[in-house]
Image (tube, rainbow, N blue to C red):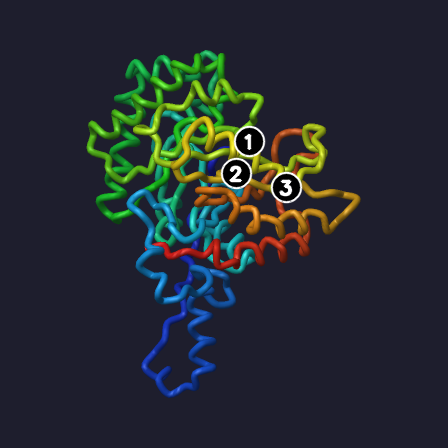
Amino acid sequence: MKAPHPVRRPARRAPGRYRLTATSVAVTCAVLIAVLALRDAGGPDGDGGGAARPSGQAGKCRPTALLEPPCGAWFGAFVPHDSDDLAEKVHDYERRLGRRLDIVYTYHDMSAVTDTRLEGQLLTEQEQRVGEDRMLLLSWESKWWGGTERQQPTWRRIADGELDDSVIDVQAERIKEYGQRTGKKVFLSFDLEMDTRTPDAGTAEEYVRAYRHVHDRFRELGVGNVVWTWITTGYLRHADLMRRMYPGDEYVDWIGYNQYNYYLCHRADWLSFARTQTATHDWVRAHISDDKPLMLSEFGSAADPDRPDRQADWYAGVVPVLKRLDGVKAALQWNHRDPGPHCDLSVANDAAWASLRKTAADPYLNQRRE
């Protein structure tokens, strides 16, 4: 998926959850249950944390140190945004979804940090605002958006340390400071879909060197709040390349892949959610890792212009499949376009939104975040 440039604008903070007061003691049991349900669902503005969980599950369902939810999966999304309105657009998406997102996905390039250009600033003010009540997945691409081909950083240059002083160390310190100030960790992906970038950016071996260099540089600088996330396309025709580009278990905490029902886009046939995910999942488990937590880092479906309810049916099939996919602990919906004709992968109509809302409300996708 070709990601758009991240763009942002200050926005109001999302309202908090409903809270019980002392007067609730006097209400009936039925009203109490309703209030509790509103508190967990976030009320009518859709800003809550999801379905209620049995109290006996609280201990064993607490997230791990690497943000893995033991009892189900996180639900997140890439939400398209303009200029500097990330918080506003995320809140609008959540109102339609009927719940708060667990993970918000944003994209950055490796340009040097400036006061006026946000693309190179990991953890912008807007991301930090969104991150107050959500987890963040930061996709850090070894590109300079808007730069010429000759200006693009290669994996060899990154591995050799040429960007340490101007880019990598600066971003490492920003993420470190965020963790020290808030106590929060972030998912960080270095060069998602790297299997589409060779040979222009370098060889598979040079990518591994670059990834390991970035990882090790963060460690040397004392950055302890990064959950390292390796994200490929998941296209099995790239199987040998993906295997060669895996940095190794000691460098990766989560594995992600991006698979879609592209119907008509790229001249693709209609594929169910199960068909988009299962083969790649099984290959990753057999050839990359049999125990790392997995993330459907971008998933979504095109609409069928001849069958308006077909996209809704597609989203209705998500949760039953997720429960069968061993180790999939996060699913992030892509609500945007892909380059090319017929490549709109956003939610198309009210029926599809209703189906996605039902999926996102499933208890399996509503896990304890603290």
Q: Which residue is drawn at 31% across and 59% down?
A: 59
90 or 316: nearer the viewer: 316
Residue underneath mark 1? 1
Q: For the C terminus, give its image quadrant.
A: bottom left
Q: Can residue 119 be seen in this view?
A: no
Distance, label 2 to label 1, CA atoms, is 8 Å
105 or 311: nearer the viewer: 311
Crowd rating for badge 1 (residues with CA inside 10 Å; few <14, some 14–19, many 20+)? some
Q: Which residue is drawn at 28% across and 45% down?
A: 65
Q: Which amino acid does label 2 sit on?
A: Glu
**Which numbered tag is attached to residue 298?**
2
Residue underneath mark 3? 301
Crowd rating for badge 2 (residues with CA inside 10 Å; few <14, some 14–19, many 20+)? many
247 or 171: nearer the viewer: 247
First in sequence: mark 2 or mark 1? Answer: 1
Q: What residue type is labelled 3?
A: Ser
Q: Could you tell me which secondary element the residue under label 3 belongs to?
A: strand
Does residue 323 appear left or right of residue 174 in this picture?
Answer: right
Give the label, 2 or 1, closer to the camera. 2
Distance, label 1 to label 3, CA atoms, is 13 Å
First in sequence: mark 1 or mark 3? Answer: 1
Q: Which residue is drawn at 27% across and 40% down?
A: 225
Q: Which residue is drawn at 70% across and 31% down?
A: 268
Image coordinates of residue 27 in percent, x first then y, are 41, 86
